[in-house]
DNA sequence: CCTACTTTGTGCGTACGTTCACAAAAGCCT
DNA sequence: AGGCTTTTGTGAACGTACGCACAAAGTAGG
């Protein structure tokens, strides 16, 4: 069924798999690099290599967007950059507010990668009067009291939480109340938000722990023992360790 | 689990699914909070709620570690904290080196969450002589030249890359050459490393793009059109059209 | 026009991950 | 002790994701 175009038989209209969505930014980055080098077209094989994925996966991912390649040739770089950008919503402006101007918030405010793709740091907020008023990255830090007003007036659509963990939930609540439906959370807490609000989490500690797990597998052999708390000692019960491989 | 003979699906000695490993730190954090509040035991239902996951998933995850619960009661908090910590390898010390002391590296060096779970910032490194020598978080920034020596002498096992993207691959190569097999990469680049080396990536820009995608779905209706590059018509025919993306 | 070659787009088998639902185990109460 | 309640641990159904392999669709050349 080689339709000229029209109806995407893909997923009902626009059902792009989550896993695919998560990879699109990766492809986009690789394509942007090619674009800057003036490369006109790229094959799925080449692009996949640049993005560090399997070429079949890449082709399938792109097929969800539409049929934008040319058999025997590959993909037109500029055209694909545009299509992916559009699908991700990067052809529009996304004002971002950063809440919590500590070390991390400070770093993010200065982070160039933010502005690079349609994201614009519209506001910096903090609860500490010792911080508000300071200028960071050419922008004045406002007080939390102004949150609702800023969100409304600047049409902020994405909130980035870089507060200490204890404050994160309250900040999230206020963001949601102010109408924000997308949150990027750097605080090490599970945020609970109403249906319809998207939360993504970035957690350094978790990433390190996952690395440690694999590192332990590789270098060390067995989990190292330490002070072992007793089993919820039932009458006469012995705490047994999990069946660990016999070394 | 009456049959103690069944060939574990998670056989392979210790075949804990990746998805489970990624959640263990989450459970650990929730358990630590309970522990601090002096809660002695917790049910899968409660713990799952605290960690923001489904309770069946939680039970299955924990079952990979062993049978540490008590039917009708729940899990002993302290005991479970220990078992998860041990499985993740957090009962041992993991010296970490941060390479690239810009805004982000600086923030990470001061980030308390690092030290909270067996991770110890053992060294800060930078290629810029204007930065080396500075003291950050009570630690002198060393020069990249000393990387190999530091890794060796301090038994650094995990490298955190917070350099600009162009430098990341070279830093990774040197880390690998120095013997490091776990890397946490904050630079927006795909690192290529030999088999056996673990790389995890944290990418702000990608997280924001994923949020933007969903935000577009929710608020906006369809992807917004912009300057549309022409379809590729002929092979040689360059269609260098409007730059869609800013650099 | 016809043949040879390249590369996309996708059907299909497999593996992995999630969730339900329930038997088995443990505590508690009478 | 026996029955009732609670909660774990897991079998099984379901759904998503991955990657091979190949037909279809395009280019290139004679």
Image (cartoon, coloured by chain):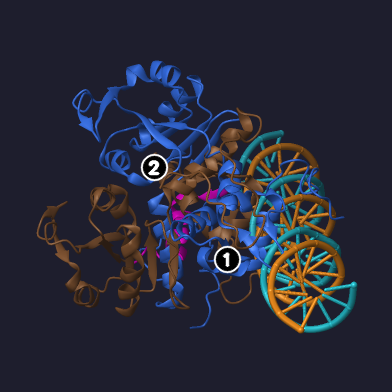
Chain colours: A blue, B brown, C cyan, D orange
Q: Name the outermost residue toward the left.
A: B133
Q: Residue at label 1?
A: A48
Residue at x 66%, y 33% (from the top left corner): B222
Q: Is residue A73 left or right of residue A219?
A: right
Which residues lie in the magenta part?
B73-92
In primary-sequence order, the first of circles 1 and 2 is 1
B196 is higher (above) or lower (below) than B70: below
Q: Are marks 1 and 2 in contact (CB under 8 Å)?
A: no
Quarter of the rendering containing residue B121: bottom left
Q: Chain of mark 1?
A: A
Number of residues whose C-alpha sits closer than 10 Å to that of mark 2, classed few (under 14), some (14–19) or many (20 or more): some
Residue B217 drawn at (x, y percent):
63, 34
Q: Chain of mark 2?
A: A
| Residue A234 shows in the view | no
| Residue A180 shows in the view | yes
In the image shown, does D4 or C8 lie closer to the viewer? Answer: C8
Q: Is residue A162 left or right of residue C30?
A: left
Label 2: state its secondary structure: helix
Q: Residue at label 2?
A: A114
Residue at x 28%, y 54% (from the top left corner): B115
Residue A200 drawn at (x, y percent):
50, 42
Residue B29 drawn at (x, y percent):
43, 48
In the image shown, does B37 or A76 lie closer to the viewer? Answer: A76
State yes or no: residue B80 in magenta. Answer: yes
Residue B105 drawn at (x, y percent):
26, 53
State yes or no: residue B174 in magenta. Answer: no
């Amino acid at each position: 069924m080689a339709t000229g175009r029209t109806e995407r038989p893909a997923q009902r209209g626009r059902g792009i798999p989550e896993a695919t969505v998560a990879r699109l930014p990766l492809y986009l980055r690789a394509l942007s690099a090619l674009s800057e080098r003036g490369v006109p077209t790229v094959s799925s094989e080449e692009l996949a290599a640049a993005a560090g994925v399997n070429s079949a996966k890449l082709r399938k991912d792109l097929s969800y967007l539409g049929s934008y390649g040319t058999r025997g040739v590959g993909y037109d770089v500029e055209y694909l950059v545009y299509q992916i950008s559009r699908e991700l919503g990067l052809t529009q402006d996304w004002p971002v507010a950063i809440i919590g101007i500590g070390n991390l918030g400070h770093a993010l405010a200065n982070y160039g990668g933010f502005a690079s793709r349609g994201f614009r740091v519209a506001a910096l907020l903090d609860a500490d009067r010792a911080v508000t008023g300071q200028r960071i990255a050419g922008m004045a830090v406002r007080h939390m009291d102004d949150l609702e007003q800023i969100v409304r007036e600047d049409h902020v659509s994405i909130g980035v939480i870089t507060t200490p963990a204890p404050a994160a939930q309250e900040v999230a609540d206020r963001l949601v109340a102010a109408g924000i439906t997308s949150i990027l959370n750097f605080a090490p807490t599970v945020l609970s938000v109403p249906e319809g609000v998207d939360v993504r989490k970035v957690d350094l500690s978790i990433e390190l722990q996952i690395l440690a797990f694999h590192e332990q597998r590789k270098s060390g052999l067995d989990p190292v023992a330490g002070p072992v708390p007793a089993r919820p000692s039932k009458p006469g019960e012995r705490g047994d360790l999990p069946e660990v491989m016999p070394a």
